[in-house]
Image (cartoon, grey):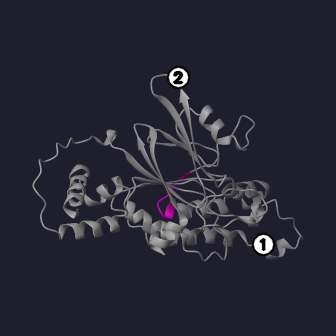
Amino acid sequence: MFGALNMLLSDAILKHGSERAAARALNIPYTTFRNRLQKERSQPAPVLHNPLNVRLVQDDDRPMLVCVIGDFHRAPGDSNQVPVWIGKYLTDMQPDAVIHIGDLGDFDSVTRWIEKGSQKSKTQSSIDEDIEAVAMGFRDMHAHYHPDNTPVLHVTLGNHDHRLWIYEDLNPQTWGTYTAKFTTMLEHYGWSHSPYGQYYTLYGVNFVHAPKHEGGGAISGKTAGQRIAAESTRCIVSGHTHKLSVHTATKLGQNQRIMAVNVGCAMPWGKVKDYAKLSACGWWWGVVMLTIHKGRVEGILAKPMFELEKEYG
């Protein structure tokens, strides 16, 4: 049994060029791949087989592995280890790119939903504390993320992040103060960013925190996924709803289709924010690994947060 399995792993290494690349292609964490390979190599040598005919694939034709991190919603006082688990998972999987879909923090310090003088405002955090909470999450993630490649790192800013820009617009004396501190923190860890609502196109796929309709608001409701797929001209990946969903739409032409993926949120499993506790929210918690090939999403691996905790906690 082990001999046959070893041949399969060896073939994967031969085909993909390295152990890490083979682990990624098989959607197996690198440490697990190495453990299996070590056990299998300790078995008697298998019967020789004909070598594979391996075709060298150009980079343009190579499927690209992209990890998408959903809404983080970090807040002052957060002590969960989600960023640590994600960092370790990224190290095992070694994606070509990591996209954070936005809403890095709650930013309740600058929300219009907390009235001045209210009971809740008495425990309201400061803007600096909100930015620091996000910075701590990125610090913990990068302390455990050790890429072997040079991945693309990009954030599509969300509506919660955008609260900083709205606040500075309404308080001109602060113009450029907090937004600069926030974006400088992202750049410190190597992340580029795009404004809330702007599409970021990578490998032919659009990424955005929340697709907007003609009126300027986020497309929402029970049929949002179908509408987004139907109206998109490319495969599109988004967040905002905190729900995991996949919708496809056939387009005119030979084998033309669009896939719309919502990646849920990246908070501890089962955590629901206070504003949604009494709602039928249907949230999903985890990270999503996409295989993108020739401009389309062709593979989806949704990794629940409880599995990340079990493997890396």
Between residue 85 and residue 183, name the one nearer to us: 85
Q: Dot 1, how many residues are within 10 Å of its Cα: few (below 14), some (14-19), or many (20+)? A: some
Residue drawn at 66 percent across, 67 percent down? 271
Residue drawn at 43 percent across, 44 percent down? 292
Magenta-tinted stretch: 187-193
Q: Taking the image as drawn, is residue 177 in sight?
A: no
Q: Is residue 189 magenta?
A: yes
Q: Dot 2, how many residues are within 10 Å of its Cα: few (below 14), some (14-19), or many (20+)? A: few
| Relative image position of residue 200 (x, y in whole percent) | 54, 44
Residue drawn at 35 percent across, 56 percent down? 24
Q: Amino acid at mark 1?
A: Gln
Disc ID at residue 124: 1
> Element type at marker 2?
loop
The answer to which quarter of the image holds residue 197 is top right
Q: Residue furthest top?
A: 253
| Relative image position of residue 294 (x, y in whole percent) | 40, 37
Q: Amino acid at mark 2?
A: Leu
In the image, residue 77 above or below residue 260 = below
Disc ID at residue 171: none
| Relative image position of residue 138 (x, y in whole percent) | 53, 67
| Relative image position of residue 238 (x, y in whole percent) | 59, 47
Sequence order check, earlier mark of 2 and 1: 1
Q: Taking the image as drawn, is residue 41 in sight?
A: yes
Q: Which residue is mark 2?
A: 252
Question: Could you tell whether 24 is left or right of 155 in the image?
Answer: left
